[in-house]
Image (cartoon, rainbow, N blue to C red):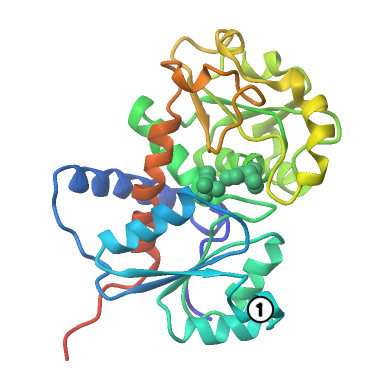
Amino acid sequence: MSARHFLSLMDCTPQELVSVIRRGIELKDLRNRGVLFESLKNRVLGMIFEKSSTRTRVSFEAGMIQLGGQAIFLSSRDTQLGRGEPIADSAIVMSSMLDAVMIRTFAHNTVTEFAAHSRVPVINGLTDDLHPCQLLADMQTFLEHRGSIQGKTVAWIGDGNNMCNSYIEAAIQFDFQLRVACPKGYEPDARFLAQAGDRVTLVRDPRDAVVGAHLVSTDVWTSMGQEDETTKRLALFAPYQVNRALLDLAAPDVLFMHCLPAHRGEEISLDLLDDPRSVAWDQAENRLHAQKALLEFLVPPSYHHA
Ligand code: CP
Ligand code: NVA
């Protein structure tokens, strides 16, 4: 299949990623100035959700409409996918009718298998392994506030989860140092660590990760699909809460990010999203702009009139 997919940050070159982010900033400016820009007129994005979502759904759906296209929300509860129709068959059929497909699911091989049988671009809207769209928004947000992230130090605090794995890929692609502070047994996937070499350092004490950092990021302690482990995780991750005192150890111009949804009083203190160092709301809004740029990058230009 010849379509270009976005299942991981590694599917693009570093130059492509930077140009998508820069385009996201341009599209944000066009929207802020009230300029109509319909580069995906009549294009249709299918959005398959096997997990819950607020930001991913709203940003992709609003983004497609703003670009002149449409988005179709497909819940696994209502499609034949949810009743066991093979992924490959679903991909062949859906990609014959749609211009792109976004998938949020559990196993990462669901998106790779779908992509292998899709004739249109497939976008990973989060799997158990990775959340690359969130990193586009995070990197756009850093660029807007502080300029290039190249050579900077980033601290990831908490669970070595899908977001952490995507931060590891971002460290490779955007060329920054990443320090991950996580409890024993909750390290990021060894495959991603091996890929990153000395760009990523693992520590146990969150203070060792944060000291001097230019960006501190965290996420929920219990990801979707791990709800049975919540009680155990709450106790184990307690020393990993990001609060104002922890941020005070970072660089004076540190930014704090959280992909949201947040659990105040757990992975962040009650007041952290109100701290001037937090850019979590900009980060959430940038999902819209960065993904519009991604859609433009992946989906071929509009149809011609007959
Ligand atoms: N950050 C993020 O992906 O949010 P949703 O789960 O609301 O889509
Ligand atoms: N790690 C979280 C991210 C939610 C956007 C999860 O997978 O549930």
- Which residue is at the far bottom? 306
Q: Is residue 82 above or below residue 130?
A: below
Which residue is under mark 1?
87
For image coordinates 86% across by 35% down, the residue present is 185
Q: State the image coordinates of residue 236 (x, y, percent, origin top left).
A: 82, 26
Disc 1 secondary structure class = helix
Circle 1 residues within 10 Å: few <14, some 14–19, many ≥20: some
Q: Is residue 237 above or below residue 51?
A: above
Q: Nearer the viewer, residue 214 or 45?
A: 45
Q: Nearer the viewer, residue 121 or 34?
A: 34
Q: Tell me: is circle 1 under 8 Å from ligand 2.
A: no
Residue 87 picture quarter: bottom right
Q: Is residue 133 above or below residue 284?
A: below
Quadrant for the C terminus in the image: bottom left
Q: Nearer the viewer, residue 156 or 41?
A: 41
Q: State the image coordinates of residue 265 (x, y, percent, origin top left).
A: 64, 22
Left or right, 202 with reference to 73 = right
Q: Is residue 262 above or below residue 82?
A: above
Q: State the image coordinates of residue 208 (x, y, percent, origin top left).
A: 70, 15
Amino acid type, residue under disc 1 in the picture: Ile
Q: State the image coordinates of residue 211 (x, y, percent, origin top left).
A: 62, 12
Residue 214 visible, this orientation: no
